[in-house]
Amino acid sequence: MRNLLALGFVLGCLLGSAASCEEPTTTDHVPVAAEDFCAQLAGALCNADRLCCEQPATGADADADADADADAGPDADPDAGPDDGGNDGDVEADVGRPDAGPAEDECLEVQRTACESVVEPLLRDPRLGYDPARAGEYLDELRAQASACWHDRPTFAAFERIFAGTGTEGADCTPRDTTAAQLRIAALSCRDGTTCHLYLRADGSPFGVCEAPEDDACSHVFDCPDGRRCNLPDHWEPGVWGVCQPLRANGWDCTGDLDCESQYCDPSHVCADPRDDRFCLHTTYRSAVEFDEPLAWWRLGDTTGNVAADSSGNGHGALYQGSPTRGRAGALADDGDTAIALDDDGQFVVAESFPALDVGNALTLEAWFLRETLDDPMPIVEYNDGTDFGVHVWNFDAGDKLFANLIEPDGTEHAITTDVGTVSSGTWHHVALTYDGTTGRLYLDGTQVGTVEGSFELRTDGDLYVGQRPSGTTPAQFLGGLDEVAVYDHALSTARIRTHFNIGDTGPAANEWVLFRWLR
């Protein structure tokens, strides 16, 4: 049959017009029945996630190869000194795909169930005119985007096109209520080339009519063509019309993804380019930290060499000193990255000073630490030039307190000390110290445990020591486990610090896929 079609094409070209010599276009999209849509969508999402996104490590994969004992350290007051008082490339989705294992089966079930919850009601609504041929084209396009790791991003408008609508011009499209979900159904119910305009009756009740679009005028949030948004007042009600305007460019305020050209409204409610992992089905600790753009991030999972790699991508490697024990079980749940153990004096990590490390008046210091016993104060992270200490975080007193000090260049101190019993032994703790120019905040395990007020510059011009205060002041040594040390040139919010801790403590957080989020 294919040969006969080719022969017909050649004869038509020879005997007909020049136009008949153009290569015929064919569409090989297989129509997809409504009852099969969610299963096929789930398959595309899970396959892309497996190929393009960091996968949570579970079971044996999350276990480190070695463990280490952590002992008590020397007796030292932390601040006592002489003067002190008190995937980019394309990835073929079906190449080398193994049989689905338990993790992939679970992924398919979760995504199919999510789709059935928010998408399937639209597919089965007779008013919307679900079109199996259009759905097949949409899913093929989505699979192509997925196989390229979402280099070309899916859009909400592409999904809307799987509905042909059933309401001809003049048809009633009155929504059941004026919630976003019902207004969307009303808009999709009108056939191509028309839109649902909302009016008020004499008694004040709303009614809708499928009509040709107005020039730039819109009666509700879904009453504009692709690429435009309806600019309505904050307290909109039926009968109030707005103006269709272009979607907002990056940098403009937004209330949701669909306000933006990029289809991404970031956590600060500003339109922005989405990150590469935007379409991943889990947020791992790596992606959570990368989202917050650390200045330097030492995961301390290096197995060889004397350089602690900087996972921020900024190239600020630190140096291992005194041969810390490598490969001990790390702090993070469902993450195979390992930690270090400092077992003896002289073992620590140091990042030698570089210009960007001198953050000035805003920062976040972050780390995970583990103490086996709580006998003595020990340094966790500290700026130090070998003579004077700068900003630092310590495990204080008998080791059951947390202590932080925001030091000014002239030595003025702004200390935060927690209550006795805040820190426990034998478990990993997450610590973060932030300063935003007016307030310093200390966090333990995602919870704020102390603050200090004031506007001042910070002493951050020395090297950054992990696990040691060097000689020249009052030497001190941390003994125990250390992991995931990061420094930022801005203050992380309480919500972001809680996110880091929660993911580290319980494992990667499940993400609702963008289409399902857009439909809620």
Image: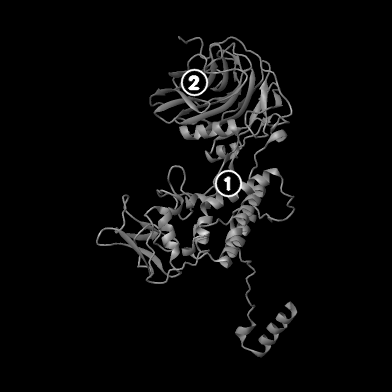
Question: What's the amino acid at mark 1?
Answer: Asp
Q: Is residue 12 visible?
A: yes
In the rendered view of the protein, which quadrant contains the N terminus?
A: bottom right
Q: Quadrant of residue 369?
A: top right
Residue drawn where x is 66% and y is 17% of the image: 70
Of residue 306 and residue 339, the one placed in the foreground of this image is: 339
Question: What's the amino acid at mark 2?
Answer: Ala
Of residue 400 and residue 129, the one placed in the foreground of this image is: 129
Decide: few, some or many residues near mark 2? Use Cα within 10 Å; few <14, some 14-19, many ≥20.
Answer: many
Decide: few, some or many residues near mark 1? Use Cα within 10 Å; few <14, some 14-19, many ≥20.
Answer: many
The single residue placed furthest to the left in the displayed view is 202
Residue linked to disc 2? 404
Q: Quadrant of residue 486?
A: top right
Across and down, in percent, residue 238 comes to 31, 57
Q: Secondary structure at mark 2?
A: strand
Q: Secondary structure at mark 1?
A: helix
Callout 1 touching callout 2 (CB < 8 Å): no
Across and down, in percent, residue 58 comes to 68, 36
Residue linked to disc 1? 277
